[in-house]
């Protein structure tokens, strides 16, 4: 049970923003699809951060993020794969459950892994439903905008499951793209991505992640759609931004141009562990304050 005292402008009355009220019900503070639409209308930036387990879910919720994404980036930052393609539905389920335990009052989007929505509509519906019913997610995300993906979006939305779409440098397509390359630089690609974005909105997605595209395309799509766009390497005109937890904290091995580190845990973590090792070896740990009934 979480108790929040909220001092925000009341934007929408139901369970979106609650004005100066004590809210004691689990999930009562959670933003939802209506809130995000209203935030775009009111020009309030939406912030999404990835989380993959109990502590990251807890910290990200404590920081009052708008949306948690249990991204398939977990394949790289948690499981140590070189890309996202080996991530399974079970991996996402396992990590969504853990993130939910840490973040009981935040809207969670669970990523649909590679090939979990590409085979047929029945499998797509089952897999997306599992992320909601077993994982505890509020919505699912899938990559791409070609006709088969639009069909998948329509099918999932038809099950009353909110869908976030994802266009641009979609990491599940790296083999097809020939690497991690910015998409939409050429006019023909620019127009194709813009057309797909419009089709995605028509298919019923409530949000669109735009990754690795020129700022001009990010702005054009954001202005053309009524659903919110969330950018990662898509410039500053999208309706919100998303970053990977490990990138914010400076824990990832690579630092692409669109990443800003707000901490340097890649140094702080090994330094802290090294200090522990040194103190044990030097007999400086444990001290009296760490010992039950210390021998005097
Ligand atoms: O998997 C992920 O973390 C993502 C974000 C980078 C948008 O898809």
Image: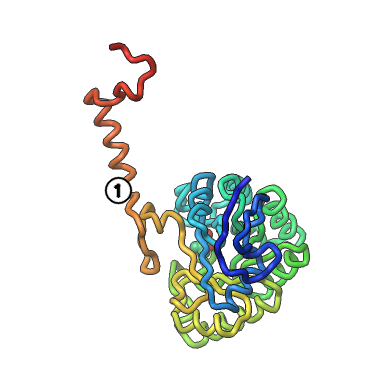
Q: Which residue is mark 1?
A: 267
Q: x, y (%) of residue 219?
A: 50, 82
Q: Is residue 20 above or below residue 212?
A: above
The answer to whether residue 134 shows anywhere in this view is yes
Quadrant of the image for the C terminus?
A: top left
In front: 86, or 65?
A: 65
Q: In the orientation shown, which residue stands out farthest toward the top?
A: 295
Residue at image location 73% in from the left, 70% down from the top: 154
The correct choice, above or below, for 111 with respect to 101 in the image is: below
Q: Classify mark 1: residues with Cα within 10 Å, few (<14), some (14-19) or many (20+).
A: few
SS type, badge 1:
helix
Residue 112 visible, this orientation: no
The structure residue drawn at horizontal position 24% and vertical position 26%, both measured from the top left corner, is: 284
Seen as rendered, the residue at the extreme bottom is 187
Who is closer to the viewer here, 194 or 201? Answer: 201
Cβ of disc 1 within 8 Å of ligand 1?
Answer: no
The image quadrant of residue 199 is bottom right
In the image, farthest residue toward the front: 20
Q: Residue drawn at (35%, 24%), measured in percent from left and top?
A: 290
Q: Residue 89 placed where, x, y %? A: 63, 51
Q: Nearer the viewer, residue 135 or 124?
A: 135
Residue 109 % position (x, y): 61, 59
Left or right of 254? Residue 192 is right
């Amino acid at each position: 049970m979480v108790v929040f005292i909220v001092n925000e402008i009341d934007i929408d009355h139901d369970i979106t923003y609650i004005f100066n009220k004590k809210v004691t019900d689990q999930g009562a503070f959670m933003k939802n699809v209506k809130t995000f639409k209203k935030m775009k209308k009111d020009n309030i930036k939406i912030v999404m951060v990835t989380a993959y387990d109990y502590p990251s879910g807890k910290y990200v919720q404590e920081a009052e993020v708008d949306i948690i994404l249990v991204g398939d980036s977990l394949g790289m930052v948690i499981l140590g794969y070189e890309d996202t393609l080996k991530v399974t539905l079970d991996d996402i389920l396992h990590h969504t459950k853990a993130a939910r335990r840490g973040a009981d009052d935040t809207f969670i989007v669970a990523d649909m892994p590679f090939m979990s929505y590409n085979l047929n509509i029945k499998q797509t519906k089952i897999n997306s439903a599992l992320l909601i019913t077993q994982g505890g997610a509020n919505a699912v995300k899938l990559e791409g905008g070609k006709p088969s993906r639009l069909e998948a979006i329509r099918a999932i939305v038809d099950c009353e499951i909110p869908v976030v779409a994802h266009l641009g440098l979609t990491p599940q397509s790296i083999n097809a793209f020939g690497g991690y390359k910015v998409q939409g630089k050429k006019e023909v690609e620019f127009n194709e991505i813009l057309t797909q974005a419009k089709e995605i909105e028509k298919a019923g997605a409530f949000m669109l992640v735009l990754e690795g595209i020129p700022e001009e395309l990010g702005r054009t799509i954001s202005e053309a759609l009524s659903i919110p766009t969330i950018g990662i390497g898509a410039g500053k005109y999208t309706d919100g931004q998303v970053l990977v937890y490990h990138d914010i904290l400076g824990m990832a091995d690579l630092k692409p141009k669109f990443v800003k580190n707000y901490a340097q845990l890649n140094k702080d973590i090994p330094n802290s562990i090294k200090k522990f090792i040194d103190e044990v070896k030097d007999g400086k740990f444990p001290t009296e304050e760490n010992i039950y009934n210390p021998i005097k």
